[in-house]
Image (tube, rainbow, N blue to C red):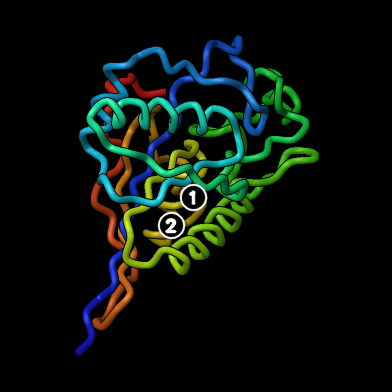
Amino acid sequence: MSEAVVTRWWWIRHAPVPDQGGRIYGQTDVSADTSDTAAFQAIATALPRDAVWVTSHLRRTHQTAEAIAAALNQSGVAVPEPLAEPDLAEQNFGAWQGLSHNEVVALRGGARHRFWLAPADQAPPEGESFTHLIARVSAAIRRLVEAHAGRDIIAVAHGGSIRAALALALDLNPEAALAIEVGHLSLTRIDHIDGPGAGNAWRVGAVNLPLGNQPPS
């Protein structure tokens, strides 16, 4: 009987974004605050050494990956150039980007959502719904699993894209996935298992571990 091939995902949410005045940034290309070197050293100690690195195309994930890599380099660990995967980007909030939460509520006729901006299946004008985000991120994950089967993959991404990865792994209803908290600089561990045996192809090892000592967002 052949052995299972396990591809291990190490998801890190990007570092905090300096105060945007409560504005929604989504796919706006804002910068992250990577000044907390102790936080990145803590993250570096938890990550595997021989891994594929991947980020979204947005600056805040690149900056976070560079800060983690700098901490690893101090320990003599070389880090490969990350792959930039646009399909791991945050949800595109379209015309809502740059607005405050209260302004979005006003546009929605006063309707508020408990965890998010709107129901999972609602797309902002010129944007995408969380349901669409799950489909986009899931396709990217499947491509990367196929290309790097059996490897460790360190993915520096966004709260929305990590929730989407958990929705794929746990076969969650999109609305249920919105309830998952993903803090800045937290670690989420998900394994893809390809091999004999019955059951799901995914195993979730940890969700939202606060390795960078950042408060929940």
Q: Which residue is drawn at 65% across and 46% down?
A: 129
N-terminal-most mark, 1 or 2: 1
Q: Residue at x 70, y 27 (%)?
A: 97
Report the mark closest to the observer, 1 or 2.
Answer: 1
Which of the numbered marks, if any, corresponds to residue 121? none
Q: Which residue is drawn at 44% across and 39% down?
A: 156
**Residue named by callout 1:** 164
103 lies left or right of 3: right
Residue 176, x across and y down, in percent: 45, 48
Residue 214, x across and y down, in percent: 33, 20
Q: What element carries label 1?
A: helix
How busy is the neighbourhood of tag 2: few (under 14 within 10 Å), some, or many (20 plus)?
some
Q: What residue type is labelled 2?
A: Leu
Asked if the residue under mark 2 is in contact with the one under mark 1, i.e. CB atoms within 8 Å, the reply is: no
Residue 200, x across and y down, in percent: 32, 71
Alpha-carbon span between mark 1 and mark 2? 9 Å
23 lies left or right of 80: right
Residue 68, x across and y down, in percent: 36, 29
175 lies left or right of 27: left
Q: Total of numbered circles in the picture?
A: 2
Q: What element carries label 2?
A: loop
How busy is the neighbourhood of tag 1: few (under 14 within 10 Å), some, or many (20 plus)?
many
Q: Determine which quarter of the picture holds residue 43.
A: top left
**Residue named by callout 2:** 172
User: Which part of the image, by quadrant, shows the N terminus?
Assistant: bottom left
